[in-house]
Amino acid sequence: MATVFAALGDPTRLKLVAVLCAGGAFSIAQLTAGTDISRQAVTKHLQVLADAGVVGDIKRGRERLWQLEPDAIAEAQHALARIGQEWERRLGRLKAFVESTPG
């Protein structure tokens, strides 16, 4: 999970994931259209995301297309939900303690 969160911690990679969330497979040219990011930079960012299991690539002829791997995102979402539940439990215990302490 740490590699997924580290990969998503970069603003450029997070933007790429947001684009890929639209669904389908996108070429590097499509992912760089309308941005000032070079194709080489996007390729490096996509490789970090791929190493974390967040995106995957498919080859169509000579073109390489990138798409979101939803399982990694779902796993990260579940991890954050578990962390949130633990914080809620701890905050509830703290609240109960503070309210029971004479004032």
Image: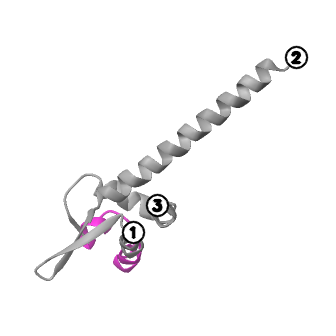
Give, as a three-letter code, the residue at label 1: Leu
Q: Which residues are magenta?
A: 28-45
Which residue bears the numbered disc 1?
49
Q: State which tag comes first along the sequence, 2 or 3.
A: 3
Q: Is residue 98 above or below residue 73?
A: above
**Quarter containing the C terminus:** top right
The residue shown at (61%, 33%) is: 89
Q: Quadrant of residue 17?
A: bottom left
- What residue is shown at x 43% (from left), y 58% (from top)? 14
On residue 102, which mark appears?
2
33 part of magenta stretch: yes
Q: Residue drawn at (24%, 66%), measured in percent from left and top?
A: 30
For mark 2, give the secondary structure: loop
**Residue 55 placement (x, y as % from top left):** 32, 66
What's the amino acid at mark 3?
A: Leu
Front-most of residues 13 and 93: 93
Which residue is denoted by mark 3 in the rendering?
Answer: 8
Q: Could you say which quadrant of the image residue 4 lies in?
A: bottom left
Q: Is the magenta region chiefly helix, strand or loop?
A: helix
Q: Residue furthest right?
A: 103
Between the residue at mark 1 and the residue at mark 3, the CA separation in whole angstroms equals 8 Å
Residue type at tag 2:
Pro
Labels 2 and 3 touching (C-beta < 8 A): no
Q: Nearer the viewer, residue 58 or 64?
A: 58
